[in-house]
Amino acid sequence: MGKLAHGAVAKFPVEFSRVVEALKKIDEASNVFWEVYNTMPRVALFFGEKYYIRASSSLALAILVMEASGYTLIKAFSTGGKSGLLDFTDLGASRSYINNVIEKLTRIIGIKPIEYREVHRLDVSKASRLRGA
């Protein structure tokens, strides 16, 4: 069985609170859970869920938001359960999920990310591509 997870890292040159407030407005990014932690630098965690017909499954989305010097870093991960003959693919639904949320976030805050990286079929062997951003 192939991995169905997708991951992305985005750096937005805006204040942490602007990103957090925008994500709260995006239902599929925050319809399960969100919390802003009282840490320095500031950190927030969002969970969303959305049904994708093409995947015949609900997908889950986790977003980690971290305050950094001069930008806000977002790490997003999407995956879902599959069963049956086509359990090796979600037909791009996990990638679409992340990209749709990032596009909505970009529209709300009015600024494109200064860096954006994606990893398809994410697993622990590819996770280093999303580290150190």
Image (cartoon, helix red, strand yellow):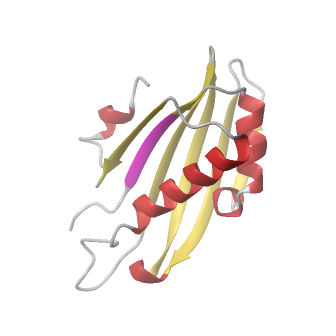
* Above/below status of 32 relative to 56: above
The quarter of the picture where residue 39 lies is top right
| Residue at 29% from the left image edge and 48% from the top image edge | 123
Q: Position of residue 9 (x, y in %)?
A: 46, 37
Task: Point out the image quarter for the N terminus.
Answer: bottom left
Q: In the image, which residues are magenta?
A: 6-10
Q: Is residue 24 left or right of residue 100?
A: right
- Between residue 74 and residue 58, name the one nearer to us: 74
> Residue furthest toward the top?
69
| Residue at 28% from the left image edge and 55% from the top image edge | 121
| Residue at 71% from the left image edge and 41% from the top image edge | 109
Q: Position of residue 58 (x, y in %)?
A: 51, 75
* Above/below status of 69 relative to 92: above
Q: From this viewpoint, is residue 12 visible?
A: yes
Number of labels in the image equals: 0
Q: From this viewpoint, is residue 56 visible?
A: no
Q: Is residue 41 left or right of residue 64?
A: right
